[in-house]
Amino acid sequence: MLDVRDDAGARERHRMRAIRARQQEEFGGVNWGAAFFGWLVAIGLGALLVGLLAAMGAAVGLTELSETEAAGNASELGIGGAAGLLVALGLAYYCGGYVAGRMSRFDGARQGMGAWLIGLIVTVILAIAAALLGAEYNVLERLDLPALPVGDSELASGGALALAAVVLVTLLAAMAGGKGGEHYHRRVDRAGFLE
């Protein structure tokens, strides 16, 4: 014998899924406002974390190495610095993707990718502006930031690989963060099914 409550519960779950599908059709896709605020979180947290990494490097005396000591340990310093940078940027973009996914009800991975895409576009625009305007407008050269006494050739050898790793890690972290932010809304939906 079929239980009437089971049948009513199934109809209610079907009705809720239909409502959610209509909502996603109407409000799904990339929400550029949420993606922008996710990017703001990612860039702010990234600046803080990279600043902390630089301060830790200066605190342990990495900037006081002689040129021969730094050149002799360039691969170890480069690998350690790249790993620290990847972790910092990955965490920053995860948090930015989370904010974007949490602000927008649907398509969390797309919201995270939108935050990442805004970051990529801004980076490309700033790189083009620096190339066109020249070194006199390069803000980073005017700052007295701690730096390793290693030549450009040693640092540039792994630059392309490091850039590819940063692009891939930040993209995946932002998308995972967006899915994490969207998960909150799915929990709310499930609670609505239980009533």
Image (cartoon, rainbow, N blue to C red):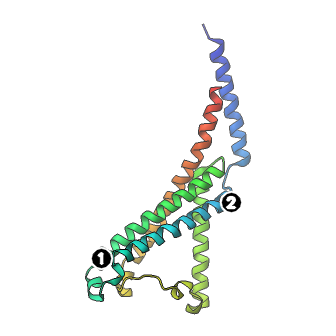
The label number, if any, that marks residue 116 in the structure image = none
Q: Which residue is drawn at the image coordinates 46% and 68% (left, top)?
A: 166
Q: Quadrant of residue 147?
A: bottom left
User: Which quadrant is home to the C terminus?
Assistant: top right
Q: On the rendered structure, is 184 left or right of 23?
A: left
**Residue ID for mark 1:** 75
**Residue ID for mark 2:** 32
**Residue 125 locus on image (x, y percent):** 62, 77
Q: Which residue is drawn at the image coordinates 41% and 77% (left, top)?
A: 159
Does residue 80 sit above or below 192 in this rendering? below
The one of 99 and 124 positioned closer to us in this rendering = 99
**Residue 59 locus on image (x, y percent):** 37, 75
Residue with the most extreme front position: 59
**Disc 1 packing (10 Å; few <14; some 14–19; many ≥20):** some
Q: Amino acid at mark 1?
A: Ser
Q: Which residue is drawn at the image coordinates 74% and 46% (left, top)?
A: 26
The one of 66 and 94 positioned closer to us in this rendering = 66
**Residue 8 locus on image (x, y percent):** 68, 19
**Disc 2 packing (10 Å; few <14; some 14–19; many ≥20):** some
Q: Quadrant of residue 39?
A: bottom right
| Sequence-first disc among 1 and 2 | 2
